[in-house]
Image: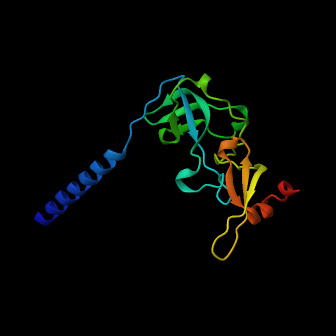
C-alpha cells in the first residue's frame, strides 16, 4: 500500500507540473454577442500557399459576426449562404478578436471556402521576371500576383514551376 501511495503522489506532482506548463501558454478568450471575429482557415495541402510556408502562411480569413455563445469555449457565427454546408459553431481556438471597427476593415473579394474550411489560391498575373546568378547556375523567378491579394503581397516563385502549374499566364 505504501508503494501505491508513493506512486499516486508522484503522479499528482507530475500532473501539476504539466498543468502549470500548459497554463502559461493558455490564453482565455471570451467574446460577446455581436462581436466581430476572424475565422481561422488553412489552405489545402499541396496547393501553393501564396508561395510562403510555415509561419508566413495566412492564418485568418474573413470577418464574421458572433451570434451566440454555446458553452464555455464554443461560439456560433453568422455565416454567409455560400458556407451553408459548414457547421456554424466553432471552438474559441479558431477565432481571433477584431481590433478596431469592422467598418474600417477593407472588404476582401469572395474567397471560396469548402467544407473542410480550406481554400485554393489562384495566380492572376505575372508582374516581373528576374534571373539571379549563383556560382554555377541561373534560376529564373517570376513575381506572381495572387487572387484576393494586393500587389504588395505578390511573391517570387520559380518560373519553371509556375509554367507547369499555370501556362496560361505566360502566353
User: Would residue 6 appear left or right of 38 to someone viewing this image?
Assistant: left
- Report the residue at 60% width, 49% height from top: 42
- Residue 53 rendering spot, x and y as whole percentages: 58, 56
171 on left or right of 116: right
Residue 121 lies left or right of residue 91; in this view the side is right
Q: Quadrant of residue 140?
A: bottom right
Quadrant that contains the N terminus: bottom left
The residue at the point 73 percent across, 35 percent down is 109
Write the residue at 52% across / 33% down.
75
Query: Can you give x and y, in whole percent of width and height, for residue 154 in the image?
Result: 68, 48
Where's the C terminus, which quadrant? bottom right
Q: Is residue 16 above or below residue 28?
A: below
Check the image and name the residue furthest to the right: 171
**Where residue 127 sits: x, y (%)?**
76, 49
Percent from the top left, x then y, of residue 43?
64, 51
Q: Is residue 37 visible?
A: yes
Amino acid at each position: 500500500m505504501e508503494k501505491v501511495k508513493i506512486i499516486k503522489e508522484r503522479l499528482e506532482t507530475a500532473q501539476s507540473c504539466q498543468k502549470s506548463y500548459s497554463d502559461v501558454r493558455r490564453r482565455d478568450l471570451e467574446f460577446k454577442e455581436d462581436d466581430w471575429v476572424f475565422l481561422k482557415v488553412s489552405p489545402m495541402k499541396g496547393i501553393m500557399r501564396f508561395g510562403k510556408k510555415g509561419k508566413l502562411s495566412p492564418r485568418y480569413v474573413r470577418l464574421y459576426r458572433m451570434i451566440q455563445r454555446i458553452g464555455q469555449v464554443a461560439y456560433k457565427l453568422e455565416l454567409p449562404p455560400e458556407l451553408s454546408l459548414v457547421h456554424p459553431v466553432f471552438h474559441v481556438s479558431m477565432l481571433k478578436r477584431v481590433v478596431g471597427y469592422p467598418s474600417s476593415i477593407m472588404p476582401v473579394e469572395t474567397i471560396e471556402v469548402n467544407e473542410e474550411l480550406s481554400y485554393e489560391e489562384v495566380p492572376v498575373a505575372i508582374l516581373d521576371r528576374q534571373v539571379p546568378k549563383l556560382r554555377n547556375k541561373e534560376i529564373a523567378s517570376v513575381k506572381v500576383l495572387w487572387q484576393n491579394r494586393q500587389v504588395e503581397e505578390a511573391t517570387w516563385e520559380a518560373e519553371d514551376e509556375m509554367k507547369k502549374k499555370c501556362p496560361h499566364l505566360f502566353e
